[in-house]
Amino acid sequence: MTDNLVRKLNDAAGSAPRAGKPIFRSAIDRLSLSDVPGIATQNDGATRYLQHSAGDELKTTLRPLIDSALGDTGAFTQLDRLSRSSSLLRIAGITRDRLGSSVTDQAPQLHLQIYRRGGGAPARQPARRRGRLLNKVLGK
């Protein structure tokens, strides 16, 4: 039963990426030279940059979409079933609201993975417009 819920969560999380694209684009456009060391020297630098620069706006935009998708994919129904069959979820405080918050909180990482699969990390895309120095720093 939990495998089914995980699949439904993944389906719901994957349904909102288009809504986040303009938010990430704006954050990337605001990238400055002072942001580069943190992005280039940390394994999760791009994720941290996006969480810092776009995280709140992204969460506000995506939360209603993710909640709707959690309903549409049956994730909320599955959670309700699991909650009725096991008191562990109720004791742990896993509710529809916490489930929606958790999926929304993970949106920056999900979006970063999607962009990477599409041909390059978002933090590297503006480097094409920022000149050779930034390209060198980012390893392009």
Image (spheres, rainbow, N blue to C red):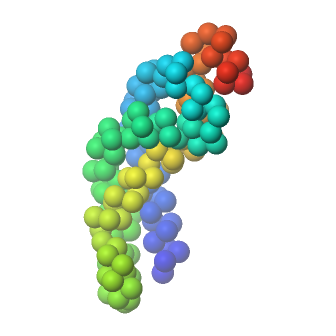
Q: Nearer the viewer, residue 7 or 83?
A: 83
Residue 106, how many percent across, how many down? 45, 52
Q: Is residue 57 left or right of residue 17?
A: left
> Which residue lies at the image location 52% right of the left edge and 26% below the top edge?
35
Q: Nearer the viewer, residue 132 or 60?
A: 132
Q: Is residue 103 above or below residue 26?
A: below
Q: Is residue 38 visible?
A: yes
Q: Quadrant of residue 61?
A: top left
> Which residue lies at the image location 63% right of the left edge and 16% below the top edge?
134
Residue 84, how many percent across, how many down? 32, 87
Residue 79, how many percent across, how many down? 36, 75
Q: Is residue 43 left or right of residue 57?
A: right
> Which residue lies at the image location 57% right of the left edge and 12% below the top edge?
130
Q: Is residue 110 left or right of residue 68?
A: right
Q: Is residue 129 left or right of residue 101?
A: right
Q: Nearer the viewer, residue 62 or 45?
A: 45
Q: Is residue 29 above or below residue 129?
A: below
